[in-house]
Image: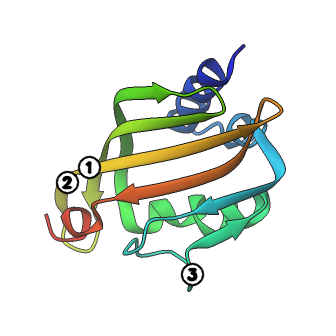
């Protein structure tokens, strides 16, 4: 499979809760940059390695959101760099309100595995729908 096919599989695995499938696509030293304003980020929003990402990001999603989902509008495939353009949807638990917020994910591949992730998301829409 090429990088785009692997990434699409990763999004499918995330949607079904197959976190092991997601992390199998990553380099051991993956660097993950979470969008500023997200409620669960570390002080700088940077996580390194699968364990830090799973425990620092993925594990917190159910604490803040119900029915969190990623709706993909498009992929921009530049080979070793792929951009996902879409939306985060779900319910913000603090208010009980549904949201649909713009989201951009930038993925960088090295030797067929993901080495870097960068997220830009409209956290104001998420937390104040």
Q: Is residue 70 left or right of residue 8?
A: left
User: Mark 3 sits on what residue?
Assistant: 44
Tell me the number on the disc at residue 102. Answer: 1
Of mark 2 and mark 3, the one earlier in the sequence is 3
User: Mark 2 sits on what residue?
Assistant: 99
Q: Where 61 falls versus 108 (above or below)?
A: below
At 65% from the left and 42% from the top, the residue drawn is: 108
Residue contact at pointers 3 and 1, CB within 8 angstroms:
no
SS label for mark 3: loop
Q: Where 79 falls versus 108 (above or below)?
A: above
Residue 106 at what x, y percent from top left?
Answer: 51, 45
At 54% from the left and 27% from the top, the residue drawn is: 12
SS label for mark 1: strand
Residue 35 at what x, y percent from top left?
Answer: 44, 65
At 56% from the left and 86% from the top, the residue drawn is: 43
Coloration of the structure image: rainbow
């Amino acid at each position: 499979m090429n990088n785009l096919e692997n990434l699409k599989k990763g999004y499918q695995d995330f949607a079904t809760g197959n976190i092991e499938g997601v992390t199998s696509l990553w380099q051991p030293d993956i660097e993950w940059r979470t969008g500023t304003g997200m409620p669960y980020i570390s002080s700088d929003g940077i996580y390194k390695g699968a364990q830090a990402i799973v425990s620092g990001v993925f594990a917190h999603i159910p604490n803040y959101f119900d029915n969190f989902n990623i709706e993909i509008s498009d992929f921009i495939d530049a080979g070793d760099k792929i951009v996902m353009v879409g939306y985060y949807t779900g319910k913000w638990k603090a208010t009980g309100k549904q949201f649909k917020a713009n989201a951009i994910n930038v993925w960088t591949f090295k030797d067929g595995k993901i080495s870097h992730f960068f997220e830009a998301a409209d956290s104001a829409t998420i937390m104040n729908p």
